[in-house]
């Protein structure tokens, strides 16, 4: 073992630190990866940063290569793009995506990395994990040709979902967000935009909800046509959700269904592995429209302050990318 890397740790809720990390010797079937950039999954990582993972969800919310335990100390994250420095010859020098935390170098099994195709910039490639969530959501939601689809919540997941569903033939997609400036993002993604006040009630065949607020979920139900369905992608942590179901919920026969990336959607589970799903997500990132989601950049050494700023709202971002210069 040798202290040949540095990693971001949540020392305790609200306190981030850069710590040395000992790398194991690379074994057969493993690769040594030097990180080029990592992305912050703002919704989940700020909940983790604030110590808001319910104890009942500690096991379910573990990241693939997490160290430590909630609420801390814990090394958490899952949007990492790097270059293979040691490993099988067919992977040497390749840019890869891995569900690894924020760390300068790391050793993982070969099957844990997905090769990023030539032409996809590393900063766009950090979105692979989020696009994978969007792929799983659309497998759950099964939008049909010509559907009217609303995506409520214009964060990372919502924007990725909106871009993918808009490419289904004949689908009209509307991104709904409380922030009017998200209209510019919607335009870059090729979808319509509406604030909650302007969104057309009773018009959507399908709603995908990503805002992680009770108000957003309530609005999602209001947007549905009779017998329509909301697919819920939000993770609320320890936040209590309040929802009024005494109105038209039953008479209009509305539905709410959960979608979560931890397992492959039932509709594809017998035919797709998690690795195949991730490979599809990486391939979908050939689309340059996803570049619009990268709204900020900081260095690895700035990460503790960046995470604090994202947590308290002083640093606005959709996808904030962390860059690494250790060669």
Image: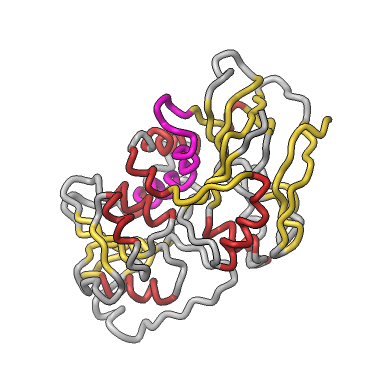
Residue at screen point 37% across, 54% down: 159
Camera sees residue 226: no
Residue 193 is left or right of residue 49, and the answer is left
Relative to the observer, which residue lies in front, 324 or 207?
324
**Residue sitting at the far bottom:** 246
Q: What range is drawn magenta here?
A: 116-138
Residue 206 is left or right of residue 317, and the answer is left
Q: Position of residue 315 (x, y in %)?
A: 53, 61
Q: Is residue 12 above or below residue 166?
A: below
Relative to the observer, which residue lies in front, 103 or 157?
103
Residue at screen point 67% across, 26% down: 32
Please tell me whether the stretch drawn in magenta is mainly helix, strand or loop. helix
Camera sees residue 72: yes
Residue at screen point 75% across, 62% down: 12
Residue at screen point 56% across, 19% down: 91
Q: Position of residue 222 (x, y in %)?
A: 28, 75
Q: Is residue 242 above or below residue 203?
A: below
Q: Position of residue 117 (x, y in %)?
A: 43, 26
**Residue 215 part of the magenta segment:** no
Q: Quadrant of residue 57?
A: bottom right
Q: Position of residue 304 (x, y in %)?
A: 67, 54
**Residue sitting at the far top:** 89
Q: Is residue 303 above or below residue 36?
A: below
Q: Is residue 287 above or below residue 160?
A: above
Quadrant placement of the N terminus: top right
Give the colour scheme shown: secondary structure
Quadrant placement of the C terminus: top right
**Residue 121 part of the magenta segment:** yes
């Amino acid at each position: 073992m040798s202290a040949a890397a540095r990693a971001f740790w949540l020392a305790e809720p609200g306190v981030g630190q850069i710590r040395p990390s000992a790398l194991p010797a690379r074994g057969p079937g493993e690769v040594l990866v030097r990180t080029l950039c990592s992305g912050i999954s703002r919704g989940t990582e700020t909940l983790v940063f604030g110590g808001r993972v319910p104890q009942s969800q500690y096991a379910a919310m573990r990241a693939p290569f997490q160290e430590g335990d909630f609420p801390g100390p814990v090394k958490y994250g899952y949007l990492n793009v790097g270059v293979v420095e040691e490993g099988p010859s067919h992977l040497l020098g390749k840019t890869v995506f891995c569900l690894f935390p924020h760390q300068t170098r790391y050793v993982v099994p070969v099957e844990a990395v997905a090769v990023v195709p030539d032409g996809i910039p590393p900063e766009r490639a950090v979105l692979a994990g989020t696009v994978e969530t969007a792929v799983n959501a659309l497998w759950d939601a099964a939008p049909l040709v010509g559907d009217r689809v609303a995506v409520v919540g214009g964060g990372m997941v919502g924007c990725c979902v909106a871009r993918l569903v808009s490419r289904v033939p004949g689908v009209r997609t509307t991104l709904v967000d409380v922030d009017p400036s998200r209209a510019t993002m919607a335009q870059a993604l090729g979808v319509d935009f509406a604030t909650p006040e302007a969104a057309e009630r009773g018009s959507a065949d399908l709603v995908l909800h990503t805002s992680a607020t009770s108000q957003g979920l309530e609005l999602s139900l209001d947007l549905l046509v009779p017998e329509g369905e909301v697919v819920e992608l939000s993770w609320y942590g320890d936040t209590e959700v309040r929802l009024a179901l005494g109105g038209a919920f039953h008479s209009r026969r509305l539905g709410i269904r959960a979608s979560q990336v931890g397992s492959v959607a039932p509709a594809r589970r017998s035919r797709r592995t998690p690795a195949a799903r991730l490979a599809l997500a990486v391939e979908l990132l050939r689309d340059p429209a996803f570049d619009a989601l990268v709204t900020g950049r900081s260095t690895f050494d700035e990460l503790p302050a960046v995470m604090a700023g994202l947590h308290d709202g002083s640093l606005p971002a959709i996808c904030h990318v962390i860059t690494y210069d250790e060669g």
